[in-house]
């Protein structure tokens, strides 16, 4: 599991999208959110998703970045994703995480980037310049604002009559698809706990982007050459707060990992790629009961052959579910149930007959 941290100061829709994209999976998780704005909406949103969130005043970000670094290290953070983070990231943090700090910017960099270019100002400038297209860029953070190597970009059209608000909404949608893919790409490239050299970071940047958006777990499964059939894991408990920070600690809510609402990919609103496999990891549908224990019990105690059939159907429930065949899994679950009942009835009937017959001395 690779731990990532999100730095955010605002609404937090990208931060929420990143959590939803990764935290139901088994490879990458947002383990920490850091903010420079105590009352930013992102704080409550992270709290609602049980993501440990810590506030550090700007004085700490500016004058004492070692405290931030210590917090990141104590959470075993391998990569940082800036998502609407409006505070300066000190050079010491950039150096310590060289090639492993990403930022998302709401334009096709290098156009409409740099100091003062953020939020609606970017979209207003794009519209005023009469650009036919805009988009979003994920880039590696360096010491020059918005100028680090580009990891991925996604274009959107600028439509006639667009306002800064309508364009911003379209770019945001593009960001929700772009950022998780870019994070997965860089994490895959650098590997957990790897000492990342500038060269490796550059490799990540130069690598071909995936042709279609895929789930992060699918991307990992493909990279590792294994099948994507690992169930989601629950979020681990929050860590203790370090000095200087106000920690928003949360207890996990009832409902386990499902509270994180592991989302279909692409996120709601984006069309699924044609022919995309609907993995069980990408559906909110819970796995139907396998009845495996009952099948075994019934096989041993009642009627062997029907019990064996029940076991076969039981084993098919999980394999079909994880292959994305939810309807097939439900059918197998129902069949297992039926064969358990058949086995039980036959067991009862044969035992009921056997006892009087044996008493009568026929067996
Ligand atoms: C995004 O548009 C991102 O490109 C920029 O800040 C905005 C953050 O939005 N860096 P949100 O807080 O994630 O909704």
Image: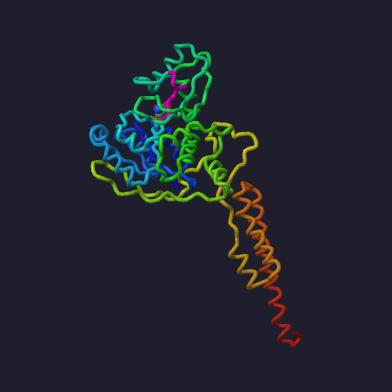
Residue extending farthest right: 362
Query: Which residue occupies 39% across, 49% down?
Result: 252
**What is the number of callouts on the image?**
0
Residue extending farthest top: 129
Asked whether residue 149 is drawn in magenta, I would say no
Q: 71 or 326: nearer the eye?
A: 71
Query: Which residue occupies 35% across, 25% down?
Result: 144
- State the image coordinates of residue 53 (x, y, percent, origin top left): 34, 41
Q: Quadrant of ligand 1?
A: top left
- State the image coordinates of residue 239 (x, y, percent, origin top left): 33, 49
Instruction: Give the magenta part as a residue range.
Output: 103-111
Residue extending farthest bottom: 361
Secondary structure mainly formed by the magenta segment: loop
Query: Which residue occupies 49% across, 46% down?
Result: 25
- State the image coordinates of residue 322 (x, y, percent, origin top left): 59, 50
Say if 131 sits above or below 216 in the image. above
Q: Quadrant of residue 244?
A: top left
């Amino acid at each position: 599991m690779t731990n990532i941290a999100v730095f955010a100061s605002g609404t937090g829709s990208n931060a929420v999208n990143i959590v939803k994209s990764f935290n139901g999976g088994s490879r990458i998780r947002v383990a920490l959110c850091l903010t420079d704005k105590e009352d930013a909406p992102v704080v409550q949103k992270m709290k609602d998703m049980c993501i440990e969130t810590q506030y550090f005043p700007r004085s700490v970000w500016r004058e004492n970045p070692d405290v931030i670094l210590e917090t990141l290290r104590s959470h075993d953070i391998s990569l940082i994703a800036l998502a609407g983070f409006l505070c300066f990231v000190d050079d010491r943090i950039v150096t310590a995480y060289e090639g492993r700090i990403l930022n998302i910017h709401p334009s096709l960099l290098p156009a409409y980037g740099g100091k003062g270019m953020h939020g609606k100002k970017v979209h207003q400038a794009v519209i005023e310049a009469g650009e036919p297209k805009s988009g979003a860029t994920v880039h590696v953070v360096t010491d020059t604002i918005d100028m680090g190597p580009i990891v991925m970009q996604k274009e959107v059209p600028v439509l006639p009559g667009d306002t800064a608000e309508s364009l911003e909404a379209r770019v945001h949608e593009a960001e929700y698809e772009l950022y998780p893919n870019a994070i997965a790409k860089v994490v895959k490239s650098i590997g957990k706990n790897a000492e990342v050299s500038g060269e490796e970071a550059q490799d990540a940047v130069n690598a071909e982007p995936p042709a279609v958006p895929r789930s992060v777990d699918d991307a990992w499964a493909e990279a590792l050459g294994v099948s994507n059939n690992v169930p989601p894991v629950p979020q681990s408990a929050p860590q203790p707060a370090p000095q200087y920070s106000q920690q928003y600690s949360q207890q996990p809510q009832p409902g386990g990992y499902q509270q994180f609402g592991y989302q279909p990919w692409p996120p709601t609103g984006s069309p699924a790629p044609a022919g995309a496999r609907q993995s069980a990891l990408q559906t909110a549908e819970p796995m139907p009961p396998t009845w495996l224990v009952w099948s075994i019990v019934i096989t041993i105690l009642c009627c062997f052959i029907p019990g064996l059939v029940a076991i076969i159907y039981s084993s098919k429930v999980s394999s079909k579910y994880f292959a994305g065949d939810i309807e097939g899994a439900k059918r197998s679950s129902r069949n297992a149930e039926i064969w358990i009942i058949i086995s039980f009835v036959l067991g009862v009937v044969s035992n009921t007959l056997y006892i009087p017959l044996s008493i009568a001395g026929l067996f």
